[in-house]
């Protein structure tokens, strides 16, 4: 799944994190569940169903009452929202004229009728067959978003980019957790190459479902190696590393190494140059195809770290990376 906003924030509205489209005032032409599908939307010219033209997204019928339509999405986990993409791909004569976004923090799957909503993006004119990108300036954490479309029509995908909000006071510092996991607040910062698969995939929940569900670079034709930067959910000491090359058979890296820093991205101006000199966390380890590799004794002694550089040497793909350790109290 590509991130058209090209930011280091993750999509909080993705089903693999548990996100759900829980309510729509109307989804006559296309069901609300398609609004948050991870795949890029497609258009099939000659595909129709019982209600009309099949469209890959959420689409309501034509309103005649002066109102507007709404779809509520429960985020995978509560988070701070930084930007939103209302993607109207393939909707040309049937996209909404405008849209606004509200958000709330609610412990229930479906917010009640008396729930207090906060407008995080005011009503804005939309363009058809386009990424309509909205910046959000709010530091609060939310669990649900409400997409309001005026007056009706279709939206292919809704992406809600931000960062999962973790209450670290509830985490036992003696408990070993995956410090890099998306669900624990980890996030991708930058990769020099994401030609076949995004860096975010390697810290996603569960095992990879296929080769496309990992991070894979193109075939390297120049000296050096490919690399990506991850930020842990919280600084910690890493005790065990798991590198999974599931589904990568003729295209896994020959070796993989990790470097680490205790700094934060806010204080690093030239990330590529700076990260190349970070201390080694895991020296280059030989990999093999389609298997999980576990490393413990090879991990170097280190103080709590926050940033990780993953080196695919010289190139290739990995399915998952797990960095098990304890948070810094």
Image (tube, rainbow, N blue to C red):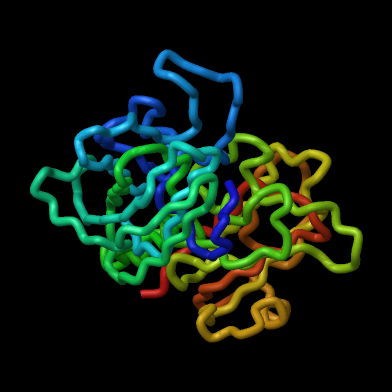
The residue shown at (22%, 55%) is 104
Residue 174 in which image quadrant = bottom left
Say which residue appears at 13% left-offset and 51% top-offset: 115
Provide residue 73's location: percent of width, then percent of height.
32, 44
Where does residue 14 sit, x and y in percent of width and height? 44, 45
Q: Is residue 211 left or right of residue 189?
A: right
Looking at the picture, tell me which residue is in the foreground, 230 or 99: 99
Residue 171 in view in this figure: no
Residue 62 position (above or below residue 259): above
Q: Is residue 268 above or below residue 30?
A: below
Q: Residue at x 24, y 35 (%)?
A: 25
Vertical arrangement, residue 305 with respect to residue 207, above or below:
below
| Picture coordinates of residue 278, whole percent (x, y) | 67, 79
Q: Find residue 208 and report its image quarter.
A: top right
Where residue 127 appears, as percent x and y from the top left, is: 48, 51
Q: Residue furthest left?
A: 114
Of the pair 219 and 184, the residue shown nearer to us: 219
Q: As displayed, is residue 89 above or below residue 229?
A: above
Q: Quadrant of the C terminus?
A: bottom left
* 41, 127: nearer the viewer: 127
Q: Which residue is rendered at x = 56% and y = 72% of the image?
A: 307
Tally of numbered discs: 0
């Amino acid at each position: 799944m590509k991130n058209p906003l090209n930011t280091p924030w993750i999509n909080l509205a993705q089903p693999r994190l548990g996100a759900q489209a829980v309510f729509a005032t109307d989804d006559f032409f296309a069901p609300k569940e398609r609004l948050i599908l991870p795949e890029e939307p497609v258009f099939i010219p000659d595909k129709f169903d019982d209600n009309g033209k099949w469209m890959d997204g959420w689409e309501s019928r034509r309103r005649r009452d002066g109102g507007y339509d709404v779809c509520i999405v429960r985020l995978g986990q509560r988070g701070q929202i930084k930007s939103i993409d209302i993607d109207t791909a393939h909707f040309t004569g049937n996209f909404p004229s405008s849209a606004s976004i509200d958000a709330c923090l609610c412990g229930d799957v479906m917010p009640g009728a008396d729930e207090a909503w906060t407008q995080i993006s005011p009503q804005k004119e939309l363009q058809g067959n386009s990424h309509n990108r909205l910046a959000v300036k709010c530091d609060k954490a939310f669990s649900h978003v409400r997409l309001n479309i005026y007056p009706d029509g279709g939206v292919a995908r809704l992406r809600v980019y931000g960062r999962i909000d973790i209450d670290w006071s509830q985490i036992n510092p003696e408990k070993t957790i995956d410090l890099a996991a998306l669900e624990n607040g980890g996030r991708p910062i930058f990769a020099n190459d994401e030609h076949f698969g995004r860096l975010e995939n390697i810290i996603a929940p569960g095992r990879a479902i296929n080769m496309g569900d990992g991070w894979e670079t193109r075939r390297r034709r120049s000296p050096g190696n490919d690399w990506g930067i991850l930020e842990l959910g919280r600084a910690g000491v890493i005790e065990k590393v798991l590198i999974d090359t599931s589904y990568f058979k003729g295209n896994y890296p020959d070796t993989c190494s990790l470097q680490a820093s205790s700094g934060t991205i806010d204080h690093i101006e030239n990330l590529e140059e700076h990260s190349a000199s970070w201390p080694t966390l895991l020296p280059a380890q030989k990999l093999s195809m389609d298997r999980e590799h576990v490393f413990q004794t090879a991990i170097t002694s280190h103080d709590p770290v926050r940033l990780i550089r993953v080196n695919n040497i010289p190139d290739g793909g990995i399915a998952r990376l797990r960095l098990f350790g304890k948070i810094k109290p």
